[in-house]
Image (cartoon, grey):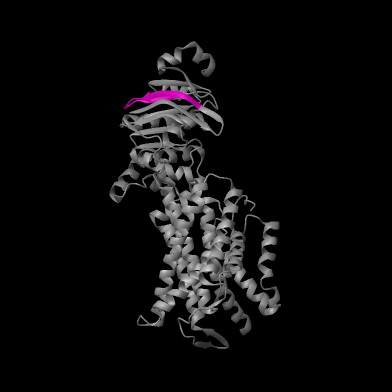
Amino acid sequence: MLELKNVSTRYGAISALTDVSFSVAKGEIATLIGSNGAGKSTTLRSIMGLAQPHAGEVLFEGKKINRMPTHRIAALGIALVPEGRAVFANLTVLENLELGGYLQKDSKQLKKDLEHVYVLFPRLKERLLQMAGTLSGGEQQMLAIGRALMAHPRLLLLDEPSLGLAPLVVQAIFDAIAVINKEGTTVLLVEQNANLALRRSQNAYVLETGRITMRGTSTELARDPRVKEAYLGE
Amino acid sequence: MESFLQQLINGISLGSIYALVALGYTMVYGVLRLINFAHGDIYMLGAYFGYYLSRLIQGRTPSHLLDAAVVMFLSMLGCALVGIVMERLAYRPVRRASRLTLLIIAIGVSLLIEYSSQVIFGADPKFFPQLIPETQIHMGGLILTNQQIIVLFTALALMVLLNLFIYRTRTGKAMRAVSFNLDAAKLMGINTDQIIALTFALGSALAAAGGILVSINIPGIDPLMGVMTGLKAFVAAVLGGIGNIFGAVLGGLILGLAEVMVSGYGSSTYRDAIAFLILIAILLFKPSGILGKGQVEKV
């Protein structure tokens, strides 16, 4: 469904990604693990066109999407839940969700989509008219995911959804991600919390200083001594 | 007391013009974090478009009011186009450049518009045609002119419309999203370039309306008329809290009132000084402005 071929991205003179190649198959949850600064967010930004790779190709459903503007990539059916959630803090929860469905012109469908998000995250329904900036971190993460779902993405990119959240909240978020995946959305999950990411995914890639250094099924990688030592703290 | 009321009305009337122009500053700042110093010149162009359009249109429609409305609408449209072209040619190519670069370009655009206008329209002031014949209305001891009333209500109506647009429409919501977080807005599928162009168009149209409304009251127009008004509207935007729509309106009204009160009760010599006194005070004591939050960028 998604394929990166030899993608290299740099910020000014600094190389952030070098020759990154990997793919995400339809229906799976794939994960990209790595430490802080390894280039995980840059990978997602390169997919969405928020960062421009200077070499390589990004293919979505066989179509080349690098060099396309971000809003058109979004319209193709890829949604990114950015690191730090990036909810529109000065807009209400409802307005945030409506913006997620910005490209949906059919108001009946929009209502249905909203209901779908409320089923997944009942907490949001209780806070519809509240400013998004007043929500707790966990609620903001729910809102960011709900907002992304409003666009009916076929591929959902999640950047550190567990960041800064209490364990119970993280559990709830990952349960929701599992439900979203079961309903047919392919997921690419970027996580620093490798333990959690490997348990919840089928395939995994390890990113170190901008390069993919290991790849395999999540079970394989979870058993790999190098992964254990570097990322699982064993 | 009557004289105070009279000054109050004059102040609100002047302030609503500043507010119209300040809105453009604040909206563009909201989406691009750019102080568009050429904005005052758009206001001047609005007046000039109005001047030439009046000569074409005046007397061709059934009423004076309709004449004025058509002139104003077309002039707003013209300035909206100028705003879009300005953004496309001057600001979009350097969107990723530093703030300082943008600021210098803005000053350059401003000078370009001012001095090419002197070449095209002539440097001498022109007399804006009287679109609506003046009649005086006596209310108690107050003397109002029909023009003052029209100016005030038109300005208020435009502000109400803008508010409805920003807070009640899908595009307005997109505009607020762009202003809050450009990248996140793109992720929603919003064509942010279009929204930014629209912001310039709207701001410029409001400035054009300001230019015409002023010229209805004070008919002398010249290519540098936008300099002082532009600066004052900028002060109004900073005073209210730049980036904040309500702040721009509030700042405009306060500035208009302050000016009128200073010339009414103090000396009209200090009329222009008050704006900058307010700017210095606000920068010293509350740099984020009355309704603004957080840090304001140095310009």
- Residue at the image position 57 percent from the left and 53 percent from the top: B105
Above or below: residue A43 compared with residue B265: above
The residue lying furthest to the front in this view is: B119
| Rendering coords of residue A81 (x, y %) | 44, 36
| Rendering coords of residue A167 (x, y %) | 50, 29
The residue lying furthest to the top in this view is: A225
Foreground residue among A7 and A24? A7
| Rendering coords of residue B201 (x, y %) | 45, 59
Give the main secondary structure of the magenta stretch: strand
Residue A25: in magenta span: yes
Q: Report the span colored magenta.
A: A17-31
Question: Can residue A234 be seen from the camera position used here?
Answer: no
- The quarter of the rendered structure image containing the N terminus of chain B is bottom right
Picture mark count:
0
- Residue at the image position 65 percent from the left and 67 percent from the top: B275
Is residue B139 rendered to the left or right of residue B187? right
| Rendering coords of residue A211 (x, y %) | 49, 22
Foreground residue among B7 and A174? B7
Question: Can residue A180 be seen from the camera position used here?
Answer: yes
- Residue at the image position 63 percent from the left and 80 percent from the top: B4
Above or below: residue B165 compared with residue A149: below
Above or below: residue B209 compared with residue B111: below
Is residue B285 rendered to the left or right of residue B15? right
Residue A168: in magenta span: no
Quadrant of res B14:
bottom right
